[in-house]
Image: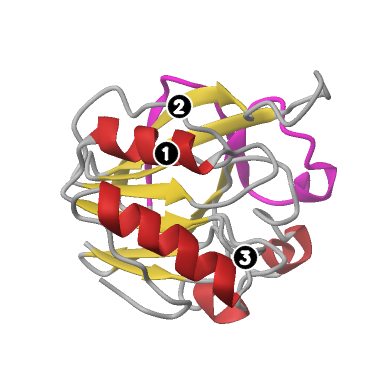
Amino acid sequence: MRITKFTHSCVRLEHDGGVLVIDPGTWSEPRALAGADAVLVTHEHTDHVDVLRLAGLGVPVFAPEGAALPDLVPLPVTRVRAGQRFTAAGLAVTALGGRHASIHGGQPDCANLGYLVGDEVYHPGDSLHPPDRPVRTLLVPAQASWLKLTEAIDFARAAGARRVFPIHDAQLNERGLASVNGWFTETVPGYRFLAAGESA
């Protein structure tokens, strides 16, 4: 499975001619969606979903039950729940988790699903919900208002994936990104940074 990282949490997965895009948000490049067969949305925050871009795409969109995405109503949106298994772009997908990580002081959270794609690649969205089974490739959030770096490192190490790539990193400047990459490289086996547009 070919993985291409785009800005922030957007990734493009290509397998046997199918193209599945996860979390094409307002910060990610439009080209991430070129030729997409389906889209997975982990939650309702705009850094993970650009509803206007999806409105013109015309492909199946899968989003969590309870996610507040009223602009997607006229689109072919399938609501999914934690534990549900379905097919998107010809790939088996299992939805895991359920809620966005707590940000601060009990502020309201929202529905958030992580997606295990092809029993191989796990994208947790805005959470550190464990994949609950071995995965070959883990996408680990690198920076967020809800995240401590030590939590992300522990999450990645516990998953034990052979390949670990960072997501959720668009708010890091060059110095911060170098620091985060340094820590992950030193502590997480299989870690590799992918720049926007780079594939593995």
Q: Indicate whether 136 appears above or below 65.
A: below
Q: Which residue is painted at 57% across and 76% down in the image?
A: 174
In which quadrant of the rendered view does residue 53 lie? bottom right
Q: Which residue is mark 1?
A: 115
Q: Which residue is mark 2?
A: 129
Q: Earlier in the sequence, mark 1 or mark 2?
A: 1
Q: Which residue is mark 3?
A: 172
Q: In the rendered view, does 117 fall on the left or right side of 144?
A: left
Q: Earlier in the sequence, mark 3 or mark 1?
A: 1
Q: Indicate whether 26 appears above or below 89.
A: below
Secondary-structure class at tag 2: loop
Tag 2–tag 3 contact (CB < 8 Å): no
Q: Where does the image place residue 62, in percent across and percent down from the top left?
A: 55, 43
- Residue nearer the viewer, 81 or 44: 44
The three-letter code of the residue at mark 1 reads Tyr
Q: Give yes or no for residue 9 being in the magenta stretch.
A: no
Classify 10 Å Cα crowding around label 1: few (below 14), some (14-19), many (20 and above): many
